[in-house]
Structure formats: C-alpha cells, structure tokens
C-alpha cells in the first residue's frame, strides 16, 4: 500500500508536462504485458502433464498431519512404487490448519491432487460438488476390496448413494478423564454407560473434592450433541434436513446450564478456551477440567501433553449411540487422469498387509478387520494400546452409522458454537440460543 | 516502507521552498530511455496484470455467480445480483461483521493517531537517546500484522496472562480479556493502537517541516505552548494528519491477522471478533461460497473507496497546504 503512493504521486505531478507521450507509452507497455501473459500461462501449463506415453504414471497425493504420519505414509507409498515401478508419487503434506483452504485452492487452480485425505466435515461438501470420484463401481468389481471392512464403516463413506471416500481408519467418541487427579482425591472413575445426569453429578463431586471442574462443558461440541441426539432417537441430519428440533436443542442447552450452575464445569471463558484451540490445549491436558470430550484416537496425542495418567470411556448414556466413524478418508479426484491407478493405490493402503502394518494406527484403527487384529497385537505404545482396547470394547456396542454430515455442516458446527456460547456467557437463555441455532442452521444447509 | 513515503504528504508544502529539479529533468527523457524504462518496469507491469488486475476482474465476475471453488468453471452458474441481495437482506452475520469492523475502526483509528501524534511530539525534541526511543516506539509497527505478535497478545491477555498479574499488584481482579466476548474486540483495539509506530514516524517527519519562524513569531505574540500547538502545529501538520488518517482507516478496516489468530479463525468468542475480512475468509474457504465471498469483497472495496472520497471532500475544509496552492 505504502509503496503504491509513490508512483501515483509522481504520475500526477508529471501529467501536466507530457500527457500524450506518457499515455501512449503506458498503453504500449500494458499491451506488451497483455501479449506476454498467455505465454506465461502456457509455459506454466506445460509442466502440468503427469501421464507420460510410456506407461509411467505420476500420481499426486495430499494429506494433513505431522512428521510421524508423513514418514509412515511416504514409506507405504514407496512400497507401492517398489511393487509397481511404473507408478511414482508427488507427495504433499502439511499441518491440519489451512489444509482445506489449500485443497480447495489447488482444485480451483486446476491442479487438484489425484488422491487426497478428507474427513467427514468436508466429505459431503466435496461429494455434493462432484469433486470426488464415485468408488462404488470399483468396490462392486472388487478392484477396491472392502470385504473385510465393518459394513457401517464403509457405509459412512457414502454420500447420496455414491461411495465418496474410503475410510482410512476408524475411531469413535471418547470421554477422556484425568486418572491421577481422581486417584489422588479418592474419587471414582467414570464408566461407560453412566447416564448424563450421573455424569454431571459425578463431575460436581469432582469439582468440590478435587478443586478442579469435573467436566468440560460440551454443549458447543457437535459430536457430543450428536451422540446425545441419537440417544433421544433423533439424529444430526435427516436426509437434507436437520434431524432435530428447537425443543431438542433447548433441552441440550438446559442440561448444561444446569451443570454450569452446579459448578460441574469451568467458567465460560475457560470452556471457550478448550473449544477454540487444538488438541494440545484440551482442558484435561491443561489441568483446567477433569474430563475432555474427544475422539478416542486422539489419546496418544493427549498423553504427550501431560504427565498425568489418562483414562477413556464412552460418552455418557447408551453407548450404542456411538458408531464406527471414519477418522478420515482417502478420496480420488473425479477429474484424475489416472483414476484406476489411484483407486489401486488406496486399495493398497487399506488392504496390503505390509502397508497397513507400516501405517499402524496413525489414522485410527485399520479399516480392514483382519489386519486390524494384527496391528493391535503389534503395537507397543501404551496410550495407543489403551485406545485400541476401548475402541474394540465399544465396537461391540456400536449402532448403525449415521449419514455423513451434509453440505453446510461446517457452518452448522460454527453456529452451534456461537449459540452454545451465547448461553454459556449468559447472553441468551437456552431456549433463545436454541432458536437462534436452529434458524441459522436451516439457512446454512439451505444455501 | 513508511519511512520512504514519509516526506510525501509534505511535498507540496516544500515545493515552493525548493525548486523541483527532478520534474524538469524527467520532461526531457529521450525515446530510447523511455523504452528501457518500460522494459525494466515490465516485471512489475506483468505482475500487476497477472496477480492484481486479472484476479480482481475475475472476482467481479464471480461475485455474480454461485462459484464454490470446487466445481469446474464450465459449471459455474450466473446468479445475477442474488449474492448482493442476500448480503443486504438475509445475512445477519454479514451485518454483524460490518458492525464489528466499524466499531473497531471508529475507536482504534483515532486513538492510534492520537497516540502516534502524542509520542511524536515528545520525541520531536533533541535530547540524549531520543533516537533509541524513536526506534523502540517504531518496533511494534515493524512486526505489523504478524502472527507471532497476536499469539503473544493472546497469552498476555488471557486469564493467567501478564496483564492480569500486573493488575493483581494493585489488588484489581482481571478478566479473561481475550476469551470474554465483551472484551475480546477491545483487546484487539489495544493491540492495533499499540502499533502506532508507522504514523508516528510520519508525524515526526511532518513536525520537522514546521518552520521554526512560525513558533518564534507566535512566541513574540505571547502564545503559550498550547496555543502554539493549536494554532501552529496542527494547521501545519494537517496534510500529514490527513495522510495518516486515510491510510490508517483503510488499515483498520482490513484488520485480519490478529482477529484470525486470537479466535483460531472463527471470529469468536460469540462472533465478537468477526471482522469483515475474517468473515469473508470464512465464507470463501470454510463455507466454500467463493462467489458470495467475492461479492462481499467488492462491497468492501466500494465502501472503503466511498469513505476515502468522503475524507478527501471534507479534507478541503481542514487540510492546509502552506504554499497556498490549494486554498
């Protein structure tokens, strides 16, 4: 901005002296630029060709995650290249933050990756816009082997009857609690199957005895709301509509208003802090609450950030409301020139014994049940062992998977946070906040 | 950056004192030299066309479509004025972000300029070590919209932050400033005001240009320090004030980084920091409504242009150029 003030100032000074010449030169310069532009574009486009005529294929693949995941994934892909020397990869990965911005921008720029990692927050967004290849025909023909997948996990990749993504791993909702804190204060541990009322009463007891708020208030957390809804016989979405009413949300918000009033949860600003930041700042890790509402496969990551011992159980209420959730998926871009090879690669990542062993549980439990057993026998990480155990125990109680969140889901999530926080900060009654949330959500999924 | 532009607003003021040799010099460029000029300029020109002008025109086009960034160009639908209509008639969060941005700019910009002018007056004297202080006050501006600074701010102004520890020394109980919807935006304003270094440096340059004869004459007439400030400094400084006002207002409207970092990209708590540009970013990249986001961007551009026009038209009444060219 600042530098731009210079040329303009000078130009306006000069104009009085030599207008015609300047303008003509300026025009000629602009003309030159216009002529030169397509050349630049053409030069850039030349580099984009990936399929050579000699049968060699270069696939681009894009995922989010840390160093450890990158190493494992690269090893698995190299293994594929060893077995299929004609196929090489252009691997791009980055941290979670900004991943979807970049994926969307790459797609818009006309060079989307052939294979990309995606999660259930965005799967329907991409599928509804026809950005993902329908994998159904490959699954039917057996080119994509899904026979060893739990049916509900496979189903959780379907959007509008199309298979939009292949589950790269499985996880489920988990209530993580600080074991050390409870033992020190002689308090009981939470158990799977305790009711929501029991959970809040337990949390109140923790607040009183341990001096640390017993539970993080999850009223702004869509996954806790979702499990609770399913226990009421409702769901987050029903087809292209919301699966719940204003009354349901009011009851949900009132449940947690009661908990806050009883001192079972931290104050609103602390709750917000837990909601707004990444996994490393979860309240159970920062010592600001006795429990956090997370995904079971986040346990090892949580464990890294605290010296205390952690335990994990299902969310309160009937655990059959939980389901085998695809922690993330592999999707193939619809416009990929090498779609068949790309499908073979994700098939390899899901079903090749060596590859699956390499990848371990980094993206959740392996989707292939036979190989899952092998991997869980092999793991040595105690936190990971624990989360596998919990997942396996819970898996026996799992209900049917819900439909994948619909287009507009990310906005619905944001609206839930806004409404729940309005109630938490006392700016609205639960009923007002619920009405606001339902109205905003309807607008979000309609557009 | 700001340093090089500093003399600009006072250009005209000094024009009468110093004959402008450069102007006459450039008038006699020969043809070959002109061509060479454009050859050297061409990277910038191409850049301007390719990464500024073309995307802008493209976004103007997209603002009339339902472009969502993922679907191919061929499937983009023309929706006419629907995006603009939605913005003004049925998008409460758009209106909310307009209000947040306006209150931010209306409060933070004047206070920032006042702080800049105040400190510039203090640092305009010749005392030992003044250079060091000028540098120190300018430092926060150099850090600009940096992410690191915003993170520091979050940590300073949360419940356990340094600011509350400081308040505790006086027995005052603090607040969770950045996590309190009543205070989060105000915390961002303080951050913006604190970065007053750039306008301060420009003010300093302006103050140097005020002829000392005027102060001497005022002293002779018996004017005190306050009178001198009101009747000499302020009028002589008005072109600089004007320049800073326009620039900082535009900057203020565009505040993004701090709000983004502080709220983890959400505009929270409870939308209290949902600045216009942040809302635009969320709309385009999270909600994947790039057409609508483009429309928002164009309304934003026009709004800033209008505000600047208003400044320029009112400027005639209070901006004084000492050589009398404009009056």
Image (cartoon, coloured by chain):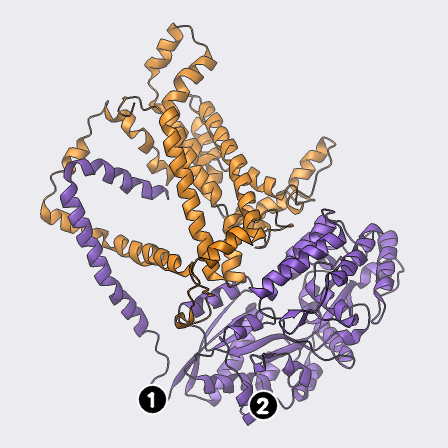
Chain colours: A purple, B orange
Q: Select label 2 or label 1 by which is in front.
A: 2
Q: Residue furthest bottom?
A: A141
SS at badge 1: loop
For the question of whether residue B214 can be seen, the reply is yes
Question: Residue, x 64% and y 55% (percent of image)?
Answer: A276
With A240 as the anchor, is A187 left or right in this view? right
Quarter occupied by residue A385 = bottom right
The percent coordinates of residue B211 (x first, y second) are: 33, 18
Residue A354 in the figure: left or right of residue A31 = right
Q: Residue furthest right?
A: A186
Q: Where is residue B2 drawn, in percent x and y?
A: 38, 38
Q: Of residues A200 and B220, which is closer to you in this image?
A: A200
| Sooner in the amino-acid sequence: mark 2 or mark 1 | 1
User: Is B54 displayed left or right of B187 in the figure?
Assistant: left
Asked if the residues shown at circle 2 and circle 1 are in contact, with their CB atoms under 8 angstroms apart, the answer is: no
Q: Is residue B285 above or below residue B38?
A: below
Q: Of B143 and B243, which appears nearest the observer?
A: B243
Q: Identify the residue position indicated by label 2 in the image.
A: A145
Residue B106 at x, y percent in the picture: 52, 36
Crowd class of label 2 (few under 14; some 14 to 19; many from 20; radius 10 Å): some
């Amino acid at each position: 901005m600042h530098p731009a003030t210079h040329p303009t100032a000078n130009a306006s000074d000069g104009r009085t002296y030599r207008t015609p010449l300047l303008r003509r030169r300026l025009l000629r310069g602009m003309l030159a630029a216009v002529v030169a532009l397509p050349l630049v574009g053409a030069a850039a486009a030349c580099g984009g060709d990936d399929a050579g005529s000699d049968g060699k294929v270069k696939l681009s693949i894009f995922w989010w995650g840390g160093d450890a995941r990158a190493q494992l994934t690269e090893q698995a892909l190299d293994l594929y290249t060893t077995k299929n020397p004609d196929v090489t990869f252009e691997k791009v990965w980055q941290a979670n933050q900004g991943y979807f911005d970049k994926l969307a921008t790459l797609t818009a720029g006309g060079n989307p990756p052939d294979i990309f990692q995606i999660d259930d927050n965005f799967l329907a967004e991409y599928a509804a816009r026809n950005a993902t290849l329908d994998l159904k025909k490959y699954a039917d023909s057996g080119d994509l082997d899904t026979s060893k997948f739990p049916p509900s996990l496979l189903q959780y990749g379907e959007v509008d009857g199309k298979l939009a993504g292949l589950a790269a791993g499985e996880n489920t909702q988990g209530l993580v609690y600080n074991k050390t804190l409870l033992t020190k204060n002689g308090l009981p541990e939470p158990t799977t199957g305790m009711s929501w009322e029991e959970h809040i009463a337990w949390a109140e007891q923790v607040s009183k005895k341990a001096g640390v708020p017993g539970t993080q208030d999850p009223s702004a957390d869509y996954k806790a709301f979702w499990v609770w809804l399913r226990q009421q016989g409702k769901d987050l979405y029903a087809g292209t509509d919301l699966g719940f009413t204003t009354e349901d949300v009011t009851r949900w918000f009132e449940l947690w208003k009661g908990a806050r009033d009883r001192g079972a949860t931290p104050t609103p600003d602390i709750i917000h802090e837990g909601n707004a930041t990444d996994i490393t700042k979860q309240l159970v890790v920062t010592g600001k609450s006795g429990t956090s509402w997370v995904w079971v496969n986040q346990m090892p990551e949580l464990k890294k950030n605290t010296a205390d011992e952690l335990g994990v159980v299902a969310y309160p209420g009937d655990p059959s409301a939980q389901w085998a959730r695809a922690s993330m998926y592999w999707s193939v871009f619809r416009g990929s020139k090498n779609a068949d090879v790309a499908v073979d690669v994700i098939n390899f990542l899901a079903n090749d014994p060596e590859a699956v062993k390499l990848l371990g549980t980094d993206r959740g439990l392996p989707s292939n049940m036979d190989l899952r057993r092998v991997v869980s026998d092999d793991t040595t990480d105690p936190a990971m062992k624990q989360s596998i155990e919990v997942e396996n125990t819970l898996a026996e109680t799992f209900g049917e998977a819900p439909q994948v969140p619909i287009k507009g889901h990310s906005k619905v999530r944001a609206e839930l946070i806004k409404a729940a926080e309005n109630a938490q900060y006392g700016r609205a009654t639960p009923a007002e906040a619920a009405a606001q949330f339902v109205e905003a959500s309807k607008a979000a999924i309609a557009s | 950056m700001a340093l090089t532009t500093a003399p600009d607003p006072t250009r005209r003021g000094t024009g009468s004192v110093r004959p402008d040799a450069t102007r006459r010099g450039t008038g006699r460029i020969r043809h070959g030299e002109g061509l060479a000029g454009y050859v050297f300029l061409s990277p910038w020109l191409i850049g301007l066309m390719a990464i500024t002008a073309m995307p802008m025109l493209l976004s103007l086009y997209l603002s009339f479509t339902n472009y969502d960034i993922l679907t191919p160009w061929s499937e983009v639908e023309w929706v006419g004025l629907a995006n603009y209509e939605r913005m003004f008639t049925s998008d409460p969060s758009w209106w909310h972000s307009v209000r947040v941005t306006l209150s931010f700019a209306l409060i933070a910009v004047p206070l920032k300029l006042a702080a800049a002018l105040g400190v510039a007056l203090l640092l305009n004297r010749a005392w030992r070590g003044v250079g060091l202080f000028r540098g120190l006050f300018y430092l926060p501006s150099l850090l600009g919209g940096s992410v690191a600074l915003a993170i520091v701010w979050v940590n300073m102004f949360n419940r356990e932050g340094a600011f509350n520890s400081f308040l505790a020394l006086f027995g005052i109980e603090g607040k969770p400033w950045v996590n309190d919807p009543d205070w989060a935006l105000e915390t961002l304003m303080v951050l913006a005001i604190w970065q007053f270094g750039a306008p301060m440096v420009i003010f300093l340059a302006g103050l140097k240009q005020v002829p000392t004869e005027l102060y001497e004459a005022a002293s002779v007439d018996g004017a005190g320090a306050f009178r001198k400030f009101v009747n000499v400094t302020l009028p002589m400084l008005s072109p600089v004030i004007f320049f800073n006002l326009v620039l900082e207002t535009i900057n203020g409207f565009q505040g993004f980084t701090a709000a983004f970092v502080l709220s983890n990209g959400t505009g929270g708590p409870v939308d209290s920091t949902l600045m216009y540009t942040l809302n635009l970013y969320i709309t385009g990249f999270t909600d994947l409504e790039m057409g609508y986001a483009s429309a928002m961007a164009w309304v934003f551009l026009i709004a800033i242009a209008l505000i600047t026009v208003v400044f320029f038209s009112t400027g005639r009444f209070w901006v004084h150029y000492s050589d009398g060219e404009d009056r």
